[in-house]
Amino acid sequence: MGYLVLAVRFLTIVPVPGREATGAEALGRAAWWFPAVGAALGACLVAADHLLAFLFPPLLGSILVIGLWKVLTGGIHLDGLADVLDGLAGRDAERRLAIMRDSRIGVFGAAGIVLCFLISAGALDALPAGRHPEILLLAPAAGRLAPLLIGPLFPAATPGQGAGAAFLEGLSRWAAPVSVAGLWILAAALLGPWGGLLLSLGLAIVLLWAVFVASRLGGLTGDALGSSVEVGELAMLGAAAALIHLRVL
């Protein structure tokens, strides 16, 4: 249970009791639990969405749900996304990594956080109210599947250095296929045959993001892995809104 405790404490601000697993590679081994923690987070968001839909008009309710979403995660992945967006503006891989190590946020990072929030809230507001539960349950789980998916496919940008490299060292290559299969079953149960299409679109966008980031940094870092969570969630919300708009889903 130590790995589950570590996963919950790392991915959320929930103060769960118990002793967490320790060691440089512990977080990578705890990654098996990431999608499950995401699904649990999604269940909390579904409950909040029901309450907020009763209290507020749709757009305001969607904004508050997205705000709660980011608060419950401590903004850890938003921070990673902001660092990556700032770093990508560097002239070469070495300079990009140096920018990402700087704790200060730049223009690209700030703009990225704002756009991420606006697009997420807009996409959720565009979904029919009856589809909110399924999407809110799937999106956080798919987002937390993203690091498991891309981790085995790319090297560490700074081998032997940083939390990202340690995570990749501890990550099992079986975590991604097992988790993808489990999430496919969940998506099909919630949305029928088209649930698999939604999940495929979300994960495909994550892979494209990872290819782009790894090509600019020479591999993956902890911030890059964190940014993939935000991209995965955003992709799921955007893809769901698009498929429903096109009357596919």
Image (spheres, helix red, strand yellow):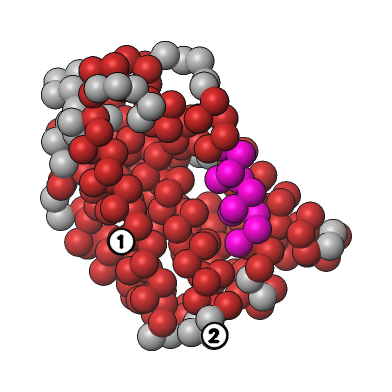
Give the x, y percent position of residue 80.
42, 32
Establish if 221 lies above or below 131. Answer: above
Q: Secondary structure at mark 2?
A: loop
Label 1 environment density (alpha carbons within 10 Å; few <14, some 14–19, many ≥20)? some
To which quarter of the image does residue 217 belong?
top left
Q: Secondary structure at mark 1?
A: helix
Q: Amino acid at mark 1?
A: Ala
Q: Amino acid at mark 2?
A: Arg
Establish if 30 lies above or below 32. Answer: above
Establish if 190 lies above or below 67. Answer: below
Label 2 environment density (alpha carbons within 10 Å; few <14, some 14–19, many ≥20)? few
Give the x, y percent position of residue 17.
49, 35
Q: Is residue 185 magenta?
A: no
Question: In the visual, does 75 lie left or right of 143?
Answer: right
Say if residue 154 shows up in the picture.
yes
Question: In the visual, does 235 lie left or right of 218?
Answer: right
* Precedes in sequence: disc 1 or disc 2: 1
Q: Camera-side residue: 90 or 84?
A: 90
To which quarter of the image does residue 174 belong?
bottom left
Residue 204: give its label: 1
Q: Identify the residue shown where x is 76% and y is 59%.
A: 59
Q: Identify the residue shown where x is 22% and y is 56%.
A: 176
Residue that lies at the very extreme toward the front in this rendered image: 91
Q: Identify the residue shown where x is 41% and y is 53%.
A: 232
Give the x, y percent position of residue 228.
37, 45
Give the x, y percent position of residue 100.
37, 21
Residue 247: give its label: 2
Say if residue 28 shows up in the picture.
no
Q: Tag count in the figure?
A: 2
Q: Indicate the quadrant containing the N terminus: top left, top right, bottom left or bottom right.
A: top left
Residue 184: give its label: none
The magenta region covers: 113-123
